[in-house]
Amino acid sequence: MCGGPVRVHFSRDNDTIKIGTFRVRSIPEVPLAATIHITGVAGFIGTHVAEALLLRGDRVLGLDNFDPFYDRSLKERNLEVLSAYPGFRFNEGDIRDEAALRVWGNGSPPDALIHLAAKAGVRPSVADPVAYADVNVSGTARVLAWARDRAIPRVLFASSSSVYGGNTKIPFSESDPVDHPVSPYAATKKAGELLCHTFCHLYGMNIASLRFFTVYGPRQRPEMAIHKFTRLLFEGKEIGVYGDGSSRRDYTYIDDVVRGVLGALNAPPGYRIYNLGESATISLSDLITLLERATGRKANRRFLPLQPGDVPVTYADITRSRAEIGYDPKVPVAEGVERFVRWYRKDPIDPTVRGGDR
């Protein structure tokens, strides 16, 4: 529903459902052989979600601007995977560019929009908050307006566990207050959620915000911890550990996240928020130990000061996600790390290729 907790009364009127005082468009389940638009399609999560949709027979129309946060060649490699599918079409363009959005939507009425495009990374957002707000807030507003104008039945928005900030109540629940983000990146994701709620309230759109918890797996961005540490282990270089290694994260394998995204395409109408995590945590020190075991290399750890914007723990309560979208993560972090290292051994990234800094 679009709003805080209220008693829900359902009534039908033509193609709308009345929920409390709000009206939202009634939607059937997103059918197979649907047309799905995806922003940020060339990224890590985007290519995996797109491939899963294409494999089940959907048509995917992707948009990406090849943001220079990490090397363009990596995204081009990702797109090569998708280009093998006849149902895939790609446009290069920026979500802040209304002309690019108009061209992207021509002639293909979408059944759903999955909005993944964003400037990524907590730490670089501290150095450049204006750019993050421009893309993640202004860009999201333009994408939502684009979806509203085309009466798209279902919209998914990629949010982040970072919206929970330094919350001490764990695990994190979607009903917890998230009014104190500790990085510009987190603030922009919270702002995006508020925009989604507002568009649901004003225009009757069906929108779900998905709070991703540290997603990893094949094709992960090169600056993310598991990818970066794996590379450093194989290169025999020291691993920088921010803090004393006790910080804990809820690492979520990409296959589980993809199943969660596909499940959210059939979420209840109105506005909903879902945690997509593994609902388990591991310390940074223990994660490095898992990577040592998987790679057969010993880590040279260098302890560094904590970084602005970092939080001590992330931990997802997935009760709502299980109940409403059938989310059921299967891959524990120990197994996921083994899978990632096997992939890395087969397809290591050239160390001269530039990656971002988380």
Image: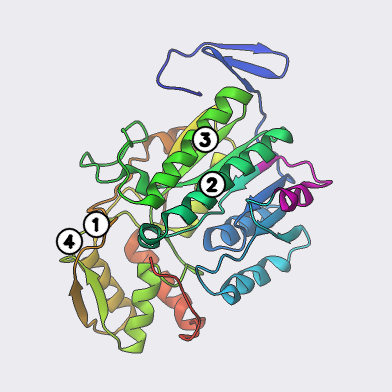
Q: CA distance from mark 4 to mark 1?
A: 6 Å
Which element is circle 2 on? helix
Between discs 1 and 2, the one toward the N terminus = 1
Name the residue at 46% across, 22% down.
3
Between discs 4 and 3, the one toward the N terminus = 3
Which element is circle 4 on? loop
Question: Are dots 4 and 1 in contact, CB under 8 Å?
Answer: yes
Q: Do we see residue 327 in this rendering? A: no
* Residue 261, label in figure: 2
Which residue is under mark 1? 248
Residue 140 % position (x, y) = 57, 44
- The nearer-to-camera label among 1 and 2 is 1
The magenta region covers 98-112
Q: CA distance from mark 1 to mark 2?
A: 24 Å
Q: Label 3 crowding class (10 Å Cα cut-off): few <14, some 14-19, many 20+?
A: some
Which residue is under mark 3? 195
Question: Are dots 4 and 3 in contact, CB under 8 Å?
Answer: no
- Three-letter residue code for mark 4: Ser
Q: Residue 57 lies in magenta, yes or no?
A: no
